[in-house]
Amino acid sequence: MTVAAIRRDADLPAGFGDLRDEARREGYTHMDRLAAEWGSGTNRFDAAGEALMAARVGGELAGVGGITRDPIDAAALRMRRFYVRPRYRGQGIGRGLAAALLAQAGGAGSRIVLNAATETAVRFWEALGFVPDRCDGHSHSLRLSGG
C-alpha cells in the first residue's frame, strides 16, 4: 500500500469515480460532497495542517481520507471524508490513511475531532485512540501527545 497526499492544484485521483460509486451503493454521500467541494474549490484541504490523502494498492485507488481545520473549533483539526473500498477493508488501509494524516496534523497538544456516523466507524476510530466526546457536532476527539 502507498499513501500519498493529493496535490491541491490537481484533480481528484484516478479511480475516484469508481470509489465514489461504491460509496454511493453503500449509502454514503460524503464522497459526492468531497467531489463537489474539490471541484468548486471551496475545500482543497490547503490550510495549515490540512491534507487530503489517497491510498493505493497495486495501482488501484483503495481509499481516501482528509483532515481540515474544524469549522466549529478553530483550535482543532477534523478528520473527514474517509472512505475505504469494501474489498480493501481490514487490510490496514484506513489505519494507514489515519496515521499519515495524524502525522500531518502537528505536534503535542493538537486536538483532532471527527464525527463517526456508524458503529463500524466508532470501532475503527476508538481502536486508534479516539475517545467519545459529544460536543459541537463531533462524536470523538483525540489529543496528540509527544513531539
Image (cartoon, rainbow, N blue to C red):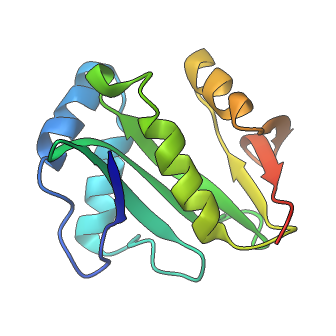
Q: Tell me how many marks there are.
A: 0
Q: Residue at x 73, y 44 (%)?
A: 137
Q: Is residue 27 left or right of residue 129?
A: left
Q: Is residue 94 left or right of residue 53?
A: right
Which quarter of the figure has residue 112?
bottom right
Residue 14's x, y, as percent? 12, 55
Given residues 68 and 64, the one toward you in this image is: 64
Q: Residue at x 14, y 47 (%)?
A: 59
Given residues 60 and 120, the one toward you in this image is: 60
Q: Residue at x 85, y 39 (%)?
A: 133
Given residues 42 and 114, the one toward you in this image is: 114
- Tell me the quadrant of the picture where the C terminus can be found: bottom right
Residue 124's x, y, as percent? 61, 27
Q: Residue at x 65, y 65 (%)?
A: 71
Which quarter of the figure has residue 83?
top left
Residue 100's x, y, as percent? 52, 58
